[in-house]
Amino acid sequence: MSPKTGARKRTAVLISGRGSNLAALVSASRDSDFPAEIVLVISNVEQAAGIGVAREAGIPVRIIPHGAYPSREAFDAAIDAALEDEKISLVCEAGFMRIHSSEFVRKWEGRILNIHPALLPDFKGLNVHRRVLESGVTTTGCTVHFVVAELDSGPIIAQARVPVEPRDTKASLAARVLEAEHRLYPEALRMVALGDVRLENGEAVWRQRTRES
Ligand code: GRF
């Protein structure tokens, strides 16, 4: 299937920092055959470097600082309003460092993705690469999953494996995993945007391929 411009899914990316995954998604979506188009970037951090990535690419940015809202719910309501305003279909979290309210997650369920720099369900949470190195595992990787209320626990859409080398530091390992993230996230977004995988009754369900599709 080759999507016409009108059929591409309007996608927002939520960031808090560097924005290298945002850059990878933007770069993939420059291809007019890519089934999603990045039309909005939301940052909760005013100085996030990723804002520059978005502006350079000519993508509208909304800065929604969480500190300006009295509660998680009010902050999420502001994000939701921005998403509705821009008629967003899909949301990619890329280094977005806030936990959502259950109401927000319920509303966007099946339409919101996150990337995590480990092979979930292992190494959920923060300080992932340090914990990977301390554990002595020889393989790590990254995961794109549907977002559910529980942190880093949603149904898995795609994973990539990355070796842990004997002399790895946190920085060298993070760099190797990040390269894999930049390949994996656009692929996962493509699958979701095409409807090849969707969230159904709390599980990731893949479309059966027919001869024609
Ligand atoms: C990535 O490692 C991602 O897996 C994690 O936060 C980091 C964000 O990096 N959730 P960037 O802002 O996309 O460069």
Image: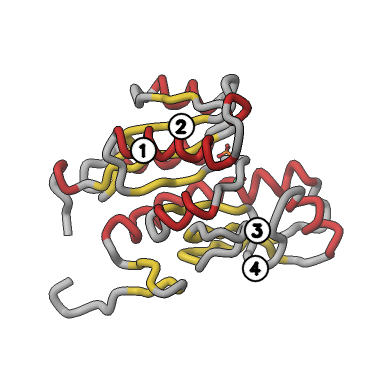
- In this rendering, is residue 152 above or below 171? below
Residue at 29% across, 34% down: 86
Dot 4 amino acid type: Pro
Query: Disc 4 or 2, which lies upstream in sequence?
Result: 2
Give me the disc on residue 42. 2
Circle 1 residue: 83
Dot 1 amino acid type: Leu
Task: State which quarter of the image contains the C terminus.
Answer: bottom left
Circle 4 residue: 121
Expressed as whole percent of the image width and height from the top left, the position of residue 108 reads: 40, 53
Q: Considering the numbered disc 1 on the image, is that residue within a helix, a strand or a loop? A: helix
Q: Is mark 1 within 8 Å of ligand 1?
A: no
Query: Disc 1 or 4, which lies upstream in sequence?
Result: 1
Q: Nearer the viewer, residue 71 or 189?
A: 71
Real-space Cα distance between discs 3 and 1? 28 Å
Q: Are marks 4 and 2 in contact (CB under 8 Å)?
A: no
Q: Nearer the viewer, mark 4 or mark 3?
A: 4
Q: Nearer the viewer, mark 4 or mark 2?
A: 2
Expressed as whole percent of the image width and height from the top left, the position of residue 129 reads: 75, 51
Real-space Cα distance between discs 2 and 3? 24 Å
Q: Nearer the viewer, mark 2 or mark 3?
A: 2
Real-space Cα distance between discs 1 and 4? 29 Å
Dot 3 amino acid type: Ala
